[in-house]
Amino acid sequence: MRGTRSLVVVLAVLLAGFGLYRLLSNDPGSAPADTKAAQVVASKDYADLVSLFGDFRSFQQGISGNIQSYSQSGWILSNLDAAPDFSAAAMAEKYSELRTFQERLESIDPSDWPISQQADYHLVRAETNGYEFQHRVLSPWSRDPGFYNDVIATLGEVAESPLQGDEVADLQSRLRSVPDVVQQAKENLKDFSLIAADLATLAVLSIGDSRSAYQSLAQGLRSHHSEIEADVEAALAAIDDYEQWIRSNEHRMTGTTGVGRENYNWLLRNVYLVPYTWDEIRTIVELEDNRVITFQRLEEHRNRDAPPIVPVGSQVEYREGIEEAVDHIMSFLRNEEILTVHDFLVPDDYFGSRLYGKGYALEDPWPETHDYFFNFSHREAVMENTHELVGHHFDMLRAERDDRPIRGGERPYKISTARDEGLAFALEELLMHAGYLDGRNPHGREITYEQAAFRTVRALSDIYMHSGDWSLAEATQFCIDNAPHGELLEGSHHLWFELDTTLRGVGHHMLMVLGKVQFMKLMRDRANQLGDDFSLREFLDEVYAAGQIPWSLIRWEMTGYDDEVSELW
């Protein structure tokens, strides 16, 4: 389950009566020189914000497909009919159009609106800023070889065979555009001084996954659509050519790894709506890392005489373990009144769409080695399924029913990552403290902290790669040296994929850990506010009702506290 704004010059945007301002004279994301110093308020109507948001979403879809899916780097890359134009001229033209939307937004005064509508204003602001960050800072089409692999991967996505109606012609058209994507990549990535060699390394690894997907596609089409098998083979040849081009030029790629602290701070404040700086977040994550490792060791001591958990040893046992864990979780949520389990919050589609898809075919032999997290979930599956089912799958089911024009659904550019990943991550440990591991093998409590510790070391890798302090190789070694059972990460697909996620999708793993901390801060604030009237179920129901939005906005809505939001302007 991945932003930008404008050019550098002095701009103070004054929203009449709003009592908020932003001073951008020293901001790396300031507005173009032809922008007036103060914007005239043209509207105080919430409907104009909704209209602007719809227009902006359509503008983004015009080049990149469906807003609900985006590449690892954060750029929206779904439902592509054929290869879009990522040339410097085309992207500059798209970027120039952004300012029109930002000016429209600046001319709207939300100061008299209810907090929920003012929060929506911030969501629109964050999304326009996210688009700006993509262009002004990341520019993946000119800096990241993996960006074009993301495009190639998207072009090969299909429904299950046999394809129906126009699906065959659509797929054929997309497959035939793969060589064009590769040619664009070679042309648009010609300034090697902009490209970090670490991104080239990750691109080569990711291309291996795309090749495997295309090979599987060819095999799947062979029975029903042999007429386009040659197109898949041509696409595979282009993919191999692209990998060879990257390998032969990697030594010439001398760009800096990461976005730097200044851009990281801008992203935090203006896109992720996080009221902290790089330095503050580093401290938060380091303290959380200390805590979970300490708790893990204490649990190991406490459980030293308990019998070990025997891991599953087959696909059948794996699926049975998931089913048992899901039944246990659902009963716990209902019986302990953790949250309201609405009629639509059911795991019916969960098994096929999420965890079963991450396993193996029933007829396959059980592998001797597994990705890192599987080594834990094969012993105690409750925490991972809490994260995936209660955290992500139920979020998806809620989003499908949320028809609010701005608030509904996921946010692009990782605007909702701290909330989505942070809450899913938080539930793993916090429901343990609420009792959902009681009566089970106590070594499961150790696994909760072992999994948490891998999140904190990934977050530290995120922070230090983007500050320029660590290279990809140094971050990799740090994870191996500091994650519990780090030897399982040595040479693993899992580790490089996670570091790819956070190096190309700036802040992803930091946001997961920070989001958990922000959730606990909100719970503390709300409990203090309500005193004896605090109810866990009502609290979580309020959180979920707010939607998939940054914690600073949820906290503002639920408590009325505006101290964090005021830090963002």
Image (tube, rainbow, N blue to C red):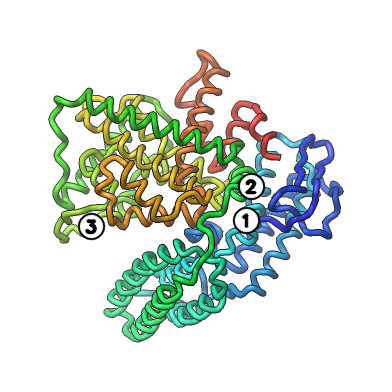
Q: Can you give x and y, in whole percent of width and height, for residue 270 in the image?
A: 65, 46
Q: Secondary structure at mark 3?
A: loop
| Residue type at tag 2 | Trp
| Residue type at tag 3 | Tyr
- Residue at screen point 64% across, 32% down: 564
Q: Is residue 404 visible?
A: no
The quarter of the image holding the C terminus is: top right
- Location of residue 338 with respect to 273 vertically, above or below: above
Calculate the distance from the C-alpha at mark 1 to the C-alpha at mark 3: 39 Å
Q: Can you give x and y, in whole percent of width and height, for residue 209 in the image?
A: 35, 66
Calculate the distance from the C-alpha at mark 1 to the C-alpha at mark 2: 9 Å
- Residue at screen point 32% across, 39% down: 451
Q: Which callout, 2 or 3, points at the residue further toward the start of the chain?
A: 2
> Which callout, 2 or 3, points to the residue nearer the camera?
2
Residue matched to label 2 = 266
Q: Can you give x and y, in whole percent of width and height, for residue 562 in the image?
A: 67, 30
Residue matched to label 1 = 133
- Residue at screen point 79% across, 34% down: 19
Q: Which callout, 1 or 3, points at the residue further toward the start of the chain?
A: 1
Give the left or right position of residue 280, taking residue 397 as reference. Answer: right
Of 506 and 151, nearer the camera is 506
Residue matched to label 3 = 360
